[in-house]
Image: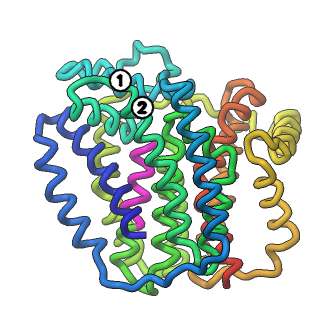
Amino acid sequence: MRWTLAILGATAVFSASSTVHLFTGVPAVAIDGPLVVAASVFLWKRSREEKAPAAGRTIFFAACAVAAAALIDHIARYPDGGNDAFIIWNLRARWLFRAGAGFRSAFSPEILFWTHQDYPLLLPGLVAGGFELLGRESRAVPAVIAVLFTACSVAIVVAGAPVEKRWWAGLAMVTTPALVMLGATEQADLPLAAFTAAAIAILIVKEPGDLRAIAAAGAFASMAAWTKNEGLLNGLLIASAVLLTERRLSSLVAFGAGALPFLSLLAVFKLGYVPPNDLAYSLSLARAISVDRWWTLLLLIGRRIVLLQAWGLHLLALVVWAVFARKWSAAPPQLRWLSWFPLATMLVHLGILLMQPHDLTFMFKVTIDRLLIQLWPSIVLLISHREAS
């Protein structure tokens, strides 16, 4: 797991240092060096990981080969990614790279609102940093980053799952059609999923009272917040689960201390460089109590569960497990509150969908798969540990 965490942490640090360099002129290496050394000391620990049994390993790697081939083929056919990639993420990366000292224009309120100027900069910063290293723009940079985060979202599940269920948990990930579909779009949803799952995995495997691990979980949760706005909600709910589980203020302080660097950067970005979020001022509670909107939402949810193109039988299996099989297993004590994190997050997202001003059917169709994939690695991890217990 430490190697996957190190890769994820390195990408976040590289993005943050590129952004700080752009904003302040401080050399990126002056930020990267100390943070990498500190992270190495923080994450390094002598331990001997158990070897996973062979059962399921061949099937898992065969499925990985099929998923990787599909991912690479899709990116080769559509090298600019999905709609949001060239409207938001790659557009902002190119803008930052080209603008140089005039980078503030990338966040101008005069830009069309669907570019979402206030979205965090982990992915654009990472892509722009790649352009800087190459000395030119290249479609290969966001493509390689997309493949890296797709692989990391699987790797963190395999590494964090119980040893006897490791390959089967990984198989549940790589056989999810939406993983390849959304990985190939070069958008920020799988990076967010990977950072969130990293925080969850650390909290699952940590020793009781290990404040260092809790701080590391806070750091990865804050990296999720630096990736997408939804990451801030994830971090708040994970922090709540930590407090309810540990019941010690020191645990919450440790989580906050780990999150502080990236949250500070996010606060500076949000307060000093970008216009307010366009959705924050348009939510209405009246829409959330509309019977028609609730009925529409319930129909849309039912249809999505059986939409085989995006999710195969995975969502249907999840519903069947939750309704019928969940009662035959019990969450370990340390997961009692954390296991409610995915459901709580999705309920908040559905509430926002009800309150937002745009056509509900359209917004549901364009967002639901992305919201689900953000939580999918965490769901697979939590279920695998519940079943193992």
Distance from Cα at disc 1 to Cα at disc 2? 7 Å
Q: Quadrant of residue 340?
A: bottom right
Q: Report whether residue 278 is seen.
A: no
**Start-end of magenta stretch:** 217-227
Q: Nearer the viewer, residue 158 or 235?
A: 158
* Disc 1: which residue: 107
Identity, as a three-letter code, of the amino acid under mark 1: Phe
Judged by its main secondary structure, the magenta piece is helix
Q: Left or right of 38: which side holds 246?
A: right
Position above or below: 200 against 346? below
> Looking at the image, which residue is at 35% across and 70% down?
215
What kind of element bears circle 1? helix
- Residue 118 is labelled as 2
Question: Compared with residue 301, is residue 209 higher up or lower down, i.e. above or below?
Answer: below
Residue at the image point whose x is 53% and y is 43% from the top: 189
Residue 75 location, x and y as percent? 53, 32
Assess whether residue 224 is covered by the magenta stretch. yes
Q: Name the one closer to the observer, 219 or 285.
A: 219
- The residue at 16%/50% (across/down) is 31
Q: Which quarter of the figure is the C terminus placed in? A: bottom right
Q: How is the image coloured?
A: rainbow
Q: Can residue 129 be found in the magenta stretch?
A: no
* Picture coordinates of residue 370, whole percent (x, y): 62, 41
Pick the residue in front: 350 or 315: 315
Asked if the residue at tag 2 contacts the one at tag 1, i.e. Cβ–Cβ closer than 8 Å, the answer is yes
Q: Say if residue 114 shows up in the picture.
A: yes
The residue at 41%/39% (across/down) is 144
Marked residue nearer the N-terminal end (1 or 2): 1
Q: Classify 10 Å Cα crowding around label 2: few (below 14), some (14-19), many (20 and above).
A: many
